[in-house]
Image: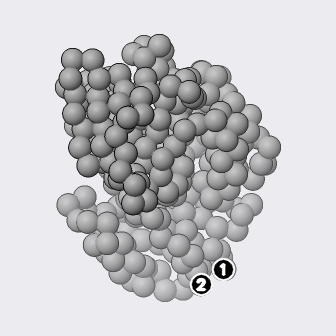
């Protein structure tokens, strides 16, 4: 049985920051196959104001982003441009990540968590002192107030008039020639239903727009705020998506490590 000090559920921005504080003693497991799905797979666009970054992990990643000038455009994070910086960060920090990992069971005794899961047809039994869930699974329980969900669409500019949808937000990236349309969805629906609903609205939008739909986000974009850490017999809950932006998520992850795991 493999043993670690900490198991982190979710290769999220907060999860990677936690792991970067103790790369040898931390294992990240993720049911998907993409880094920072809380921001990247959902194509989340956030303002990136100039501010003093707290924490070494966030500062290192910010330095890596600055090597790609198109990542931040007009004060907003161009989420489609940041994956190279994210991959280099994970590699440079020697993060241990198991993608395509499905948790079968999680048990706790007086001093350890034992996690059983399957990853690419192989069964894993992993033991650790700490378990931290950084996914959006408990977002509604962890949020201070309301949680909003949307399906984001990547739109290529082909004309002067943008696509207009009721109650949707437009995040414009003029340098890249595209924008992200953040469309509210019914949280009671499954992802396939949400995607069908959002794409169904698209033809009903402003008809004089010649802009092109390039891609629908692979995951729902979740927004909200979590100011306190939840803990119970199942470990800690630190929802990475309940952050102001991806650097703030890393700051929260590193602060969590100092407060609870150091």
Question: Between disc 1 and disc 2, whose residue precedes?
Answer: 1
Residue 216: x %, y % from top left: 47, 70
Label of residue 210 in the image: 2
Q: Marks 2 and 1: in contact by CB < 8 Å? A: yes
Dot 1 corresponds to which residue?
159
Disc number for residue 196: none
Separation (CA) of disc 1 from disc 2: 6 Å
- Residue at left offset 64%, top offset 22%: 56
Label 2 element class: loop
Residue 61 coordinates in the image, percent (x, y):
67, 35
Q: Which colouring convention does the figure follow?
A: one colour
**Is 158 above or below relative to 93?**
below
Which quarter of the rendered picture does the N terminus lie within? top left
Q: 215 or 105, which lies in front?
A: 105
Residue 194 x, y percent position in the rendering = 31, 69
Provide residue 51's location: percent of width, then percent of height.
Answer: 64, 27
Q: Is residue 227 visible?
A: no
Q: Residues within 10 Å of mark 1 (few under 14, many from 20)?
A: few
Question: Which quadrant would residue 134 be assigned to in this image?
Answer: top left
């Amino acid at each position: 049985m493999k043993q670690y000090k900490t198991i982190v559920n979710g290769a999220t921005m907060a999860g990677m920051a936690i792991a970067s504080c103790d790369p040898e003693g931390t294992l990240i497991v993720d049911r998907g196959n993409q880094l920072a799905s809380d921001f990247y797979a959902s194509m989340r666009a956030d303002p990136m104001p100039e501010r003093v970054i707290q924490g070494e992990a966030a500062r290192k990643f910010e330095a890596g982003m600055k090597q790609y000038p198109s990542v931040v455009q007009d004060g907003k994070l161009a989420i489609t441009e940041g994956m190279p910086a994210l991959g280099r960060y994970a590699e440079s920090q020697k993060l241990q990540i198991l993608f395509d990992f499905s948790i079968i069971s999680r048990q706790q005794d007086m001093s350890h968590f034992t996690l059983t899961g399957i990853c690419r047809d192989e069964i894993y039994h992993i033991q650790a002192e700490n378990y931290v869930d950084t996914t959006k699974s408990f977002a509604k329980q962890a949020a201070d107030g309301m949680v909003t969900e949307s399906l984001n669409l990547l739109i290529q500019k082909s004309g002067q008039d943008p696509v207009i949808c009721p109650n949707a937000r437009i995040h414009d990236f003029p340098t890249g020639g595209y924008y992200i349309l953040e469309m509210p969805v019914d949280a009671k629906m499954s992802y396939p239903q949400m995607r069908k609903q959002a794409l169904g609205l698209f033809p009903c939008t402003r008809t004089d727009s010649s802009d092109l739909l390039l891609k629908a986000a692979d995951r729902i974009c979740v927004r909200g705020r979590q100011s306190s850490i939840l803990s119970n017999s199942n470990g800690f809950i630190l929802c990475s998506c309940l952050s102001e932006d991806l650097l703030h998520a890393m700051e929260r992850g590193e602060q969590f490590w100092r407060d609870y795991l150091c």
